């Protein structure tokens, strides 16, 4: 990868997209996988280029709700013309765990987006 630069972004209520130039899909997907693993996430389904990363136990979360820390994100890395687009979408809202869980999801989502952008640009 040469000099990577962010050339665009888009934010919706449930997802954020970052567009990078000077990178390959494979290189961005590798950086995403390393960053997510460092934060304690594992690839639960799919591939590095289109997969679901999660932390915590889905079964325990279903039984105990907000008492169990569970986060899940759908991540897609695709070619976008000459650029590479990274789309991160919330896999859960946190609303089933109440206001505290929803706030936790929002805070973690912001930290992941910031960290991924920094990791890819470095």
Image (cartoon, grey):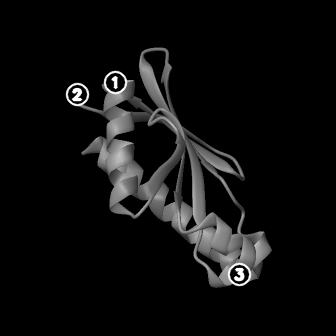
Q: For label 3, count other residues whose C-alpha is less than 10 Å away and answer few (under 14), some (14-19) or many (20+).
A: few
Residue assigned mark 2: 1
Residue 100 seen in this snapshot: yes
Secondary structure under the numbered disc 1 in the rendered image: loop
Residue 29 location (% of width, % of height): 39, 36
* Neighbourhood count class around disc 2 (C-alpha, 10 Å): few under 14, some 14–19, many 20 upward: few
Residue 10: image x %, image y %?
60, 40
Residue 106: x percent and y percent? 62, 67
Q: Give left or right: position of 6 versus 9.
A: left
Q: Is residue 4 left or right of residue 104?
A: left
Res 92 quadrant in image = bottom right
Q: Nearer the viewer, residue 77 or 70?
A: 70
Distance between the alpha carbons at the discs numbered 2 and 3: 44 Å
In space, the residues marked 2 and 1 are separated at their CA atoms by 7 Å
In the image, residue 117 sits, relative to residue 19, either above or below, namely below
Mark 1 or mark 3, which is nearer to you? 3
Secondary structure beneath label 3: helix
Return the disc, 1 or 3, that comes first in the chain's sequence. Answer: 1
Q: Which residue is located at x 47 percent, y 32 percent?
A: 49
In the rendered view of the protein, which quadrant contains the N terminus? top left
- Per the image, the residue denoted by label 1 is 24
- Residues marked 1 and 3 touching at CB (< 8 Å): no
Residue of label 3: 64
Mark 1, Cα crowd under 10 Å, few <14 / some 14-19 / many 20+, is many
Asked if the residues shown at circle 2 and circle 1 are in contact, with their CB atoms under 8 angstroms apart, the answer is yes
Earlier-in-chain disc, 2 versus 1: 2
Quarter of the image containing the C terminus?
top left
Q: Earlier in the sequence, mark 2 or mark 3?
A: 2
Q: Secondary structure at mark 2?
A: loop
């Amino acid at each position: 990868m040469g000099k990577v630069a962010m050339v665009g972004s888009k934010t919706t209520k449930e997802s954020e997209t970052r567009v990078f130039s000077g990178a390959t899909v494979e290189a961005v997907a590798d950086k995403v996988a390393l960053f997510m693993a460092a934060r304690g996430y594992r690839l639960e389904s799919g591939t590095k280029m289109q997969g679901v990363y999660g932390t915590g136990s889905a079964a325990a979360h279903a039984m105990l709700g907000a008492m169990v820390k569970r986060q899940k994100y759908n991540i897609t890395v695709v070619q976008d013309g000459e650029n590479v687009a990274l789309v991160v979408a919330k896999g859960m809202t946190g609303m089933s765990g109440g206001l505290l869980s929803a706030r936790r999801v929002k805070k973690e989502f912001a930290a992941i987006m910031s960290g991924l952008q920094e990791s890819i640009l470095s």
